[in-house]
Image (cartoon, grey):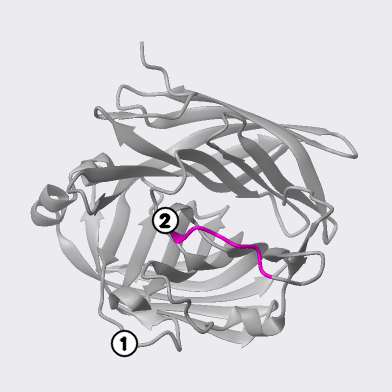
Amino acid sequence: MAHNDNVRFVLEPSDEYCHKPDDASNYNESMYFNVFDPLRKVGGWFRLGNRVNEGYAEMSTCIYLPDGRVAFMYGRPKIEDNRKMNAGGLRFEVVEPFEKLRVVYEGKTCHLERPLEMANPSKAFKSNPILPCSVELDYRGVAPMYGGRPVLADGSEIPIDPEKSFAKAHYEQHVAAAGSIAIGDESWTIDGFGLRDKSWGPRYWQAVSWYRWLPMSFGPDFAMMISIIGREDGNPRRSGMVLRDGEYVTIRDARIESEWDENWYQTKLRAWAKTDEREHHVEGRVLSMIPLRNRRKTPQGSMLVTRITEGMTEYTCDGKTGYGLSEYLDQIVDDKPIGPDVPHG
């Protein structure tokens, strides 16, 4: 997290469970898990976002198969309270806070031979087979917790504007996961690594203009997360951490250079991250890509469109090969992503 002498981060085991919602209409409490099996080249991510004051949850299940196919499902199932993470067939269980969690999905997924078709979700869901899907994954922490709820030095809350908020509290942790995934008549045993996060507070997906998020794992004792978030002042926030032998080292500065296809989807990247100890040079190659979007109509009637490209990515660093995600969020203006690194020639 960005360093500020006047701010400290608070994180309690109870934060692993659901909180009492704020009064903000856009209150969101979300948990997210990903996993990538380095041998079988199967990966996936799972997210629930409880928007209880709006009466629904955002449910996403995304599974990357070894040959480039992607199985995906999104829904907005109705919820009446914020007591649990369980909606739309997806369930997250806290077995032991910070140590052991469980992800279960029983539902259906859209089976995409050409995942880029999800740029038009209505057409993609109508023109691709919908298959039964079953996921059971047991997660265990391989790292300490990173982040929490920021408070002032005296412990008081930091005021936020719900209209401009992405979350008031956020934490992440690198993990290992084992279990099984079944789609249609295919199934895989999973034994891999990944990252999970949790956030709560008011959220609009349009609250940030763009970000680049690179969670990656090279094994149980070497992993990384690089984050660059655009800000209104034009000075992006660069942060993250490196996992070395069970401890996190804070990233002080970072850069990401990307290569793009004709749709402005990332295909390759080079990242540089600096800690107090050393510099890390990372190369990434996107193995499979699915473009997602979020749309919101303003009270004035205009439509805001956010694009999030989710790429299963093979990473190399220090002679090691690992796997993870490259998640790029951009607001779309005049049909183009607005990130400053996106070529507009």
Is residue 192 visible in this depiction of the protein?
no
- Mark 2 residue type: Glu
Percent across and percent down for residue 292 are 31, 48
Packing grade of label 1 (10 A; few <14, some 14-19, many >=20) is: few
Q: Nearer the viewer, residue 131 or 116?
A: 116
Q: Which residue is mark 1?
A: 80
Percent across and percent down for residue 36 are 53, 56
Q: Residue at x 61, y 34 (%)?
A: 236
- Mark 1 residue type: Glu
Q: Residue at x 47, y 56 (%)?
A: 43
Is 223 situated above or below 174? above
Q: What type of secondary structure mainly makes up the magenta span? A: loop
Q: What separation in Å lies between label 1 and label 2 (alpha carbons)?
A: 23 Å
Percent across and percent down for residue 81 are 37, 87
> Bounds of the magenta span?
157-162
Q: Earlier along the polypeptide chain: callout 1 or callout 2?
A: 1
Q: Is 326 inside the magenta-drawn segment?
A: no
Packing grade of label 2 (10 A; few <14, some 14-19, many >=20) is: some
Q: Secondary structure at mark 2?
A: helix
Q: Nearer the viewer, residue 225 or 11?
A: 11
Figure quadrant of the C terminus: top left
Q: Which residue is mark 2?
A: 163
Q: Secondary structure at mark 1?
A: loop
Q: Nearer the viewer, residue 208 or 44?
A: 208
Q: Nearer the viewer, residue 218 or 214?
A: 214
Q: Residue at x 24, y 29 (%)?
A: 335
Q: Residue at x 72, y 71 (%)?
A: 156
Q: Is 158 inside the magenta-drawn segment?
A: yes
Q: Residue furthest top?
A: 345
